[in-house]
Image (cartoon, grey):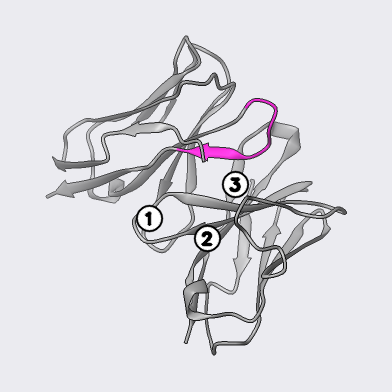
Amino acid sequence: GAVVSQHPSRVICKSGTSVKIECRSLDFQATTMFWYRQFPKQSLMLMATSNEGSKATYEQGVEKDKFLINHASLTLSTLTVTSAHPEDSSFYICSARDPSIGETQYFGPGTRLLVL
Amino acid sequence: GQQLNQSPQSMFIQEGEDVSMNCTSSSIFNTWLWYKQDPGEGPVLLIALYKAGELTSNGRLTAQFGITRKDSFLNISASIPSDVGIYFCAGPLLGAQKLVFGQGTRLTINP
């Protein structure tokens, strides 16, 4: 149980385009999902907390107009990187929390974004 | 942002050796989580601890939730090549949903 999927696993795009990443909880309902960014050899950096049916809460320094988050259902959250630039290239990971079993977060496999 | 203090940052061991890593914090946590991350993958939950003093095993892995609620350790016994990776401790801040993470322990095993 507690499986989280992400799609796509990797994407290469041209500078200026927008990229959408999907995060799905496959066998549980997640009222809250989280989006992280990870740089090489570093720990995970929380970008935003995504609550189903309401606006996402962004961490300090993360541009909400740049990283659009939508959590329209209890099993799906999307992160859209708008007008991507090479500095947005990174490893993006989502996680989901199953409220029925407490604070534990289950992570997706990650999405590698390369902006040319 | 706030982080957990995780040590050691890296370990180079021989196959078959036991491994021990720990996390400490100046704040109290009600939950301690240990994850393992392989290259190019998302973190995978190894052990979740919910009660002070709790000692939990998952195969060759054992983790404990410190009595003070400010620390936790993870032990791996009889290491094997597939144990290679980065191990993270994490915990939710009291009253918050988000997790804070340790800096990670990178485990390398020499065959």
Side of B82 where A87 appears, left or right: right
Residue B38 is tagged as 1
In magenta stretch: residue A31: no
Q: Which residues are magenta?
A: B94-101
Identify the mark at residue A106; answer none if there is no mark.
3
Marks 2 and 1, how far apart at CA: 10 Å
Q: Residues within 10 Å of mark 3 (few under 14, many from 20)?
A: many
For mark 1, does the 10 Å Cα neighbourhood hold few (<14), some (14 to 19), or many (20 or more) residues?
some
Query: Looking at the image, which residue is at 70% across and 55% down?
Result: A25
- Res. B67 mark: none
For the residue pair B71 and A82, the one nearer the viewer reads as A82
The front one of B37 and B14 is B37
The amino acid beneath tag 3 is: Tyr
Q: Please name the residue shown 41% across and 64% down the image.
A: B40
Q: Is residue B70 left or right of residue A63?
A: left
Rendered location of residue A18, percent (x, y): 66, 82
Which three-letter amino acid code belongs to the residue tagged 1? Asp
**Along the viewing direction, whichever of A60 and B63 lies nearer the viewer:** A60
